[in-house]
Image (tube, grey):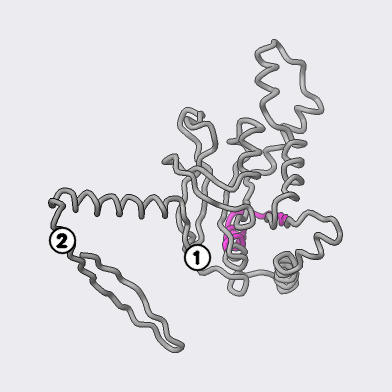
């Protein structure tokens, strides 16, 4: 027996509906356990076919940091939850001129890919948000995600241990959740949110005024870490991937 709930939408109203389907299987050659095994195999195949599929909902991917600072599966992992927000650029408080400029820029980014190609400009868009807590940064991010129909991928630079992890986040079409499941998430469906961008200041100072390495072990370890140059390179490298924001 199978039960499904759904909503049928009409121009002026919507009706909650449900149906129950019952299928009877019988066989003149198979025993009950064989039929049950067949049904279980069908269920398994169906689950496998939809594994890692996000559907039509928007999601928030939050970078996950293990307790001991190690990633057991060799790549960054993300917790995920559905983006349940009614924020839009129309109901987020913004200065009128700022709102118009933001809407214009987002619309141009979404609809004028030909301009980027013609002028040899990477089809990417970067927006700097700053201000004290409560000033609307998170609400604006959710509004942009809803407008552009993109999944939010939150990146904390201080939690990235190597260049490989940095490149993995910005260049692959899949992400790993905390359960080890690989989720298809194309670059052109992502809205990257880079937190604590100011934490890179220490990297810049280290590169400019850094002291000499103490030993060979430390040298090898530092070779794996990334610098501001690596971050800028990987962001610019997104020009080979369509519509990164």
Residue pictured at 64% horizontal, 33% vertical:
164
Position of residue 232 measured from the top left corner of the image (x, y, whole percent): 76, 42
Q: Spatial distance from mark 2 to mark 1, Cα to Cα?
A: 48 Å
Residue pictured at 60% horizontal, 69% vertical:
92
Q: Which of the 4 image quadrants contains residue 123?
A: bottom right
Numbered-mark total: 2
Q: State the SS at label 1.
A: loop
Residue pictured at 22% horizontal, 49% vertical:
37
Q: In the image, is residue 130 above or below residue 181?
A: below
The residue labelled by disc 1 is 85
Q: Earlier in the sequence, mark 2 or mark 1?
A: 2
Position of residue 228 measured from the top left corner of the image (x, y, whole percent): 75, 36
Question: Which one is closest to the eye, mark 2 or mark 1?
Answer: 2
Q: State the SS at label 2.
A: loop
Identify the main secondary structure in magenta: loop
Q: What is the magenta range?
A: 126-142
Does the magenta run of residues contain 132?
yes
């Amino acid at each position: 027996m199978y039960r499904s709930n759904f909503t049928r939408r009409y121009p002026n109203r919507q009706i909650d509906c449900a149906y129950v389907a019952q299928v009877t299987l019988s066989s003149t050659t198979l025993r009950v356990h064989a039929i049950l095994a067949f049904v279980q195999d069908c269920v398994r195949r169906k689950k496998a076919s939809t594994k890692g599929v996000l559907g039509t909902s928007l999601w928030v991917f939050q970078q996950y940091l293990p307790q001991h600072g190690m990633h057991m599966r060799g790549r960054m992992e993300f917790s995920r939850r559905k983006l349940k927000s009614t924020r839009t650029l129309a109901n987020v408080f913004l200065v009128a001129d700022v709102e118009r400029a933001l809407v214009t820029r987002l619309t141009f980014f979404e609809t004028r890919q030909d301009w980027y190609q013609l002028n040899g400009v990477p089809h990417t868009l970067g927006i700097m948000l700053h201000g004290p807590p409560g000033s609307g940064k998170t609400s604006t991010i959710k509004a942009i995600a809803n407008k552009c129909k993109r999944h939010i991928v939150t990146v904390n630079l201080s939690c990235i241990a190597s260049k490989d992890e940095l490149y993995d986040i910005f260049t692959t079409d899949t992400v790993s959740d905390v359960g080890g499941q690989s989720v298809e998430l194309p670059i052109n469906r992502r809205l990257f949110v880079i937190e604590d961008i100011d934490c890179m200041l220490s990297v810049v100072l280290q590169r400019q005024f850094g002291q000499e390495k103490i030993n060979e072990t430390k040298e090898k370890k530092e070779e794996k870490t990334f610098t501001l140059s690596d971050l800028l390179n990987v962001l610019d490298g997104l020009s080979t991937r369509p519509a990164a924001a």
